[in-house]
Amino acid sequence: MTRPAPIIEPSPAPDPAAVPALSIDGVSHAYGQRRALMDVTFNVQPASFTALLGLNGAGKSTLFSLITRLFGIQAGRISIFGHDISKNPGEALRLLGVVFQPRTLDLDLSLTQNLLYHAALHGISRREAAARSAELLGRIGLADRAGSKVRDLSGGQMRRLEIARALLHRPRLLLLDEPTVGLDVKARADIISHVRQLVAEQGIGVLWATHLFDEIHPDDDLVVLHQGKVLARGPMSRVIAESGAQDVNTAFMRLTGAQAMPGGGA
Amino acid sequence: MSSITTREAPRGFSAGEYLTCLTGIVWREGLRFLHQRERFVSALVRPLVWLFIFAAGFRQVLGISIIPPYETYILYEVYIAPGLMAMIQLFNGMQSSLSMVYDREMGNMRTLLVSPLPRGFLLFCKLLAGTAVSLLQVYAFLLIAWLWDITPPPQGYLTVLPALILSGLMLGSLGMLISSGIKQLENFAGVMNFVIFPMFFASSALYPLWRVQEGSPYLYYLCEANPFTHAVELIRFALYGQINWISLAVVATCTIVFMIGAILAYDPSRGLARRGPAGGEG
């Protein structure tokens, strides 16, 4: 079932007047001799859900580390709402919310304490932070757990808390690195619908890294990352059509020349 | 991408935002410390073992002549108390660094570094937070030492505070500088053995340096060059309301050098062998 991978031509920029929420422009990165990213280019538009699809080791985490300034950029440019992450990191990071794949909560602190700490890191005053924390905890249905230790939460609840935390400083771009890994079906569905709601209601641009095809909708923007290269990008339905496939699973296999795909279903 | 230039001017950060960030980081470190009772107990037990057992045994062996800042003959316990205070800070500084390596692996450092405030400032806050924790430990030790008849002048408890802050920052920065080059905890533990023990023993913490000089002039010079010696002497003099200017100068200089070094070195992408050939800007 494998064929040489057809390369999809880059899609033209949707609207030149609109400043993309996230712009990745010709980014390459290497760890010594090993090249993790090669000339990666794509945009995330405001109020859009962009799925970054790739297997483990495709370069997703490296890309996240670059966007979040954890690594210095070796080649290319990354900007958030037009703010270059290298030249103007403060303004860029102010507009960015991140949910990392590994859990990054303080397990022995309470939900509220975790949120207040994050707010402080963004220079949000204590009173304002307390108000926002209470509001966000209410929205994710954990208001009655505000004083509990994070350690006592379920995996799905921790993820919801991390998303709430990422939204505390009211970013306009939200990055999520495989946020549903390790969650049960119900918790996964909750997280996905919550994030899609943020896109629809608050106009947040979302970059959602995943290797699970069923998390992507036909009208989502899709970026297929494989071995450090962008193989295809554009609306998912078009990527599927242009690869001559019927579904995203087959399309991905044709693009990457992969033998078998893990995690296609639930 | 040159079309994307029309946007609001960068507004920077206000002093209030910096202060909120600083207090938030110190507050979290304090909360974490309160949840780690074992860490507090072990931080106290270590110097107390030295004080109660080692010093008691050594009292008869080592006579201390009258040397500044002391004005009378003193017991050996009294002599080593400032050294043990500095030891608390040395261990704490290294332990905070360990937690930064640990945090980096666990992702908490990621959370910190995504803050929009300048990275150097964030790391400085982290160092100050670690120092604040060491102050709690040192004052708890001083309280127990007071019950053990180690009674510096009452105002000494206040005058020693700035010295402790400075020495805490110096040792924390040194720990961070070292931890930046370390990838694995095993390696870090090794470095601790190569750093903590030599620094502690080749200093004036346990014996006055004139004694060392009698034994070995070379070791004496080594001790004199050891920043930890000067942290001990700065604390010792400050505890008796005096300033040892040479130690102050050495500790202040080392703090600045170590801190700048630590901040520059603390770049996860610059970790040892992972560094690519094209470092570039950014």
Image (spheres, coloured by chain):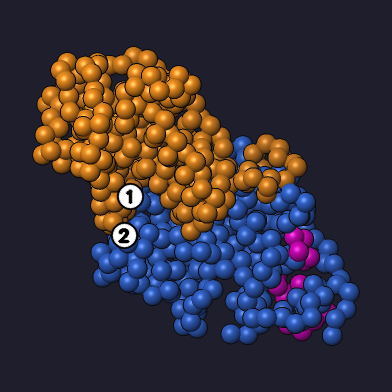
Chain colours: A blue, B orange
What amino acid does circle 2 point to? Leu
> Would residue B68 appear left or right of A96 to someone viewing this image?
left
Q: Residue A245 lies in magenta, yes or no?
A: yes
Looking at this rendering, what residue extends furthest in the right direction?
A: A4
> In the picture shown, does residue B224 fall above or below A141?
above
Badge number at residue B28: 1
Instruction: Please give the chain letter of the residue carrying mark 2.
Output: A
User: Which quadrant: the C terminus of chain A?
Assistant: bottom right
Tag of residue A183: none
Is residue A11 or residue B147 the one in the foreground?
B147
On the image, the x and y values in percent for residue A263 come to 64, 81
Residue B6 horizontal/vertical position (percent): 62, 39
Give the residues drawn in magenta, as a range.
A227-247
Q: Residue A98: where, in percent of width, then height?
A: 51, 57
Tag count: 2
Q: Residues within 10 Å of mark 1 (few under 14, many from 20)?
A: many
Considering the image in quadrants, where does the N terminus of chain A appear? bottom right
Res B163 → quadrant: top left
Q: Chain of mark 1?
A: B
Q: Is residue A149 visible?
A: yes
Task: Report the residue at 39% width, 34% height from top.
Answer: B201
Q: Is residue B65 above or below residue B206?
A: above
For the point 38% across and 28% down, which residue is it?
B203
Q: Residue at x 26, y 24 (%)?
A: B236
Image-based side of B124 in relation to A259, left or right = left
Mark 2 and mark 1 in contact? Answer it, CB < 8 Å.
Answer: yes
Q: Nearer the viewer, residue B183 or A156?
A: B183
Q: Which mark is residue A109?
A: 2
Above or below, B216 relative to A198: above
- For the residues labelled 2 and 1, the Cα–Cα distance comes to 9 Å
Q: Nearer the viewer, residue B120 or B53?
A: B53
